[in-house]
């Protein structure tokens, strides 16, 4: 099956177009070559984007697919009139019908990140990222009461990427804390966590997958051995059950799925978008 080129064209970062477009493309088994063209915010840049799209269509021998989130009407007009690809104008599809329904014009603001430095939500997200980095892997016990969620689990079960995703995407102060052999010997949670039981959420993983991940980091070590991984996973899950901690397996789940499950469970009072 030959490749087809997909373009994500935006007068902002292109993240919205790419995220939405990829969600749609995931429904198809075709092979796609993806190209993001951000900050297409002038007529000149629009003509350059058109040249790239048309060239790709010619080389591929089939129309390129073009997802756009353009709010500048002059720029959009160039793309619409000259582009030889299949155009999917996402703002046109959703914003204009909403304008009609709400009987009000949209702000036509370019990108969710414009004037970010003046946005309290953006500043809160940066603060959450800094907090999560400072409280990664149990580095700091201070201010744990300011955490929105505290992830617990054994090494390489997905705590750090999930914490950072929750901070970056939702502005949540997400700490994470490792469960280590000393905790299993005591058969108790780390003392620093006992006062924050309602904020704890556990992550586990299949021992076979854990062994694969750890072997990439420390090949042929006891740390990565399947026997040790089985022991740690078993002990960690038993501890979480005894402690009444909500938990899930990350084995086959994406970061987005893990984060969504956590949000459903902890139901934070406020999220930043």
Image (cartoon, rainbow, N blue to C red):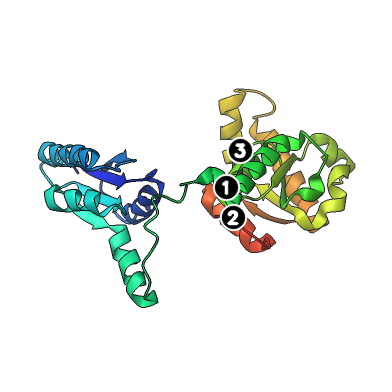
Q: Nearer the viewer, mark 3 or mark 1?
A: 1
Tell me, for residue 210, which label it has, or none. 3
Q: Is residue 78 left or right of residue 18?
A: left
Circle 1 — which element? helix
Residue at 21% x, 54% y is: 87
Residue 97 visible, this orientation? yes
Residue at 39% x, 43% y is: 13
Q: Nearer the viewer, residue 46 or 258?
A: 46
Q: Going from the N terminus, do you reach mark 2 or mark 3 first?
A: 3
* Image quadrant where residue 89 sits: bottom left
Tell me, for residue 122, which label it has, or none. 1
Quarter that holds the N terminus = top left
Q: Going from the N terminus, do you reach mark 3 or mark 1 first?
A: 1
Query: In 3D space, how far apart are the residues under numbered discs 2 and 1 (Cα atoms)?
Result: 8 Å
Q: What is the x, y in percent for residue 205?
A: 62, 45
Can you identify the residue that label 2 sits on?
A: 272
């Amino acid at each position: 099956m030959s490749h087809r080129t997909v373009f994500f064209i935006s007068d902002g970062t292109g993240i919205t177009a790419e995220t939405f477009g990829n969600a749609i493309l995931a429904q198809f088994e075709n092979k796609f070559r993806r190209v993001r063209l951000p900050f297409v915010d002038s007529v000149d840049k629009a003509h350059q984007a058109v040249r790239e799209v048309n060239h790709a269509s010619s080389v591929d021998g089939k129309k390129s697919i073009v997802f756009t989130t353009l709010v500048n009407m002059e720029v959009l007009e160039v793309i619409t009139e000259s582009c030889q690809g299949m155009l999917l104008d996402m703002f046109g599809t959703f914003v204009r019908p909403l304008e009609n329904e709400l009987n009000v014009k949209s702000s036509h603001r370019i990108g969710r990140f414009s004037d970010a430095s003046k946005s309290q939500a953006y500043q809160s997200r940066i603060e959450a990222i800094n907090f999560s980095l400072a409280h990664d892997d149990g580095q700091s016990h201070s201010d744990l009461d300011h955490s929105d969620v505290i992830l617990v689990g054994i090494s390489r079960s997905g705590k750090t990427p999930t914490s950072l995703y929750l901070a970056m995407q939702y502005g949540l102060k997400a700490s994470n804390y490792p469960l280590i052999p000393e905790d299993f010997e005591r058969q108790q949670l780390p003392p620093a966590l006992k006062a924050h039981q309602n904020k704890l959420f556990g992550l586990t993983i299949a021992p076979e997958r854990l062994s694969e991940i750890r072997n990439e980091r420390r090949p042929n070590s006891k740390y990565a051995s399947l026997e040790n991984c089985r022991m740690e996973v078993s002990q960690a899950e038993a501890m979480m059950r005894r402690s009444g901690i909500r938990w899930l397996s990350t084995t086959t789940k994406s970061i987005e799925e893990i984060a969504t499950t956590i949000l459903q469970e902890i139901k934070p009072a406020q999220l930043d978008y």
